[in-house]
Amino acid sequence: MTTQYLHSAEQPRPLVRLSIPADALTIKPSAPTNALYDCEWPKLYLVITAPPALLHTDPDAAKRPVSWPLNLLLFEYIMRLARGGTYNVLAAECALSLRNLKDHLLSTFATTPTQRESVEFFVTERHSYVLKKLRFDEDGCITLF
């Protein structure tokens, strides 16, 4: 998940603030109701658990997953983005909700840059983004890989 940008001579580069593995994401329906009439349709929720890096420093983070209501428009918007589609399709309906989720995840799960020993960012290579990593050792040396 990117938020800030590293500024370089060429262009801004997205800085990775949070990485959530795919196995930390689940889709769950809302609890069924026992009402026979006038009951609501079940809702789907994207449940995001804490990333493993956070669990090492805060074991209680596993008890605080984030649930996000997921409707058909949001699902289609996310799938389009994930497959490289244009961000402007359905953006008016979904971008604010997705931004709110991103802000909530960062405030819940992200660590500050001083707590990390590496920084990840994206650079453009041949019309696509490539993930790069800077690692800082205890002597202050920087390694790019």
Image (cartoon, helix red, strand yellow):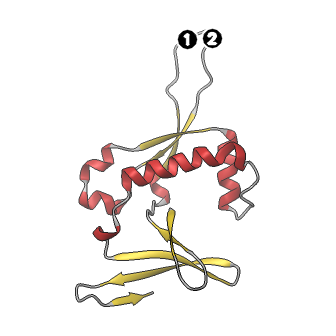
Q: Is residue 23 visible?
A: yes
- What x and y, as percent, mark residue 89? 76, 52
Q: Residue at x 44, y 62 (%)?
A: 18
Disc 1 packing (10 Å; few <14; some 14–19; many ≥20):
few
Q: Closer to us: mark 2 or mark 1? A: 2
The spot of residue 56 in percent (x, y) is 26, 61
Q: Position of residue 25 (x, y in %)?
A: 49, 51
The quarter of the picture where the C terminus appears is bottom left
Q: Quadrant of residue 81?
A: bottom right
Residue 40, picture quadrant: top right
Residue drawn at (61%, 46%), measured in percent from left and top? Answer: 96
**Against 14, is 141 above or below?**
below
* Mark 1 residue type: Ala
Compared with 41, 122 (above or below) is below
The residue beneath circle 1 is 35
- Reading the image, the residue beneath label 2 is 38
The answer to whether marks 2 and 1 mark residues whose Cβ atoms lie closer than 8 Å is yes
Which amino acid type is marked by label 2?
A: Asp
Residue at the (31%, 71%) spot, across then down: 116
**Does residue 138 appear left or right of residue 108 in this picture?**
left
Relative image position of residue 74 (x, y in whole percent): 65, 44
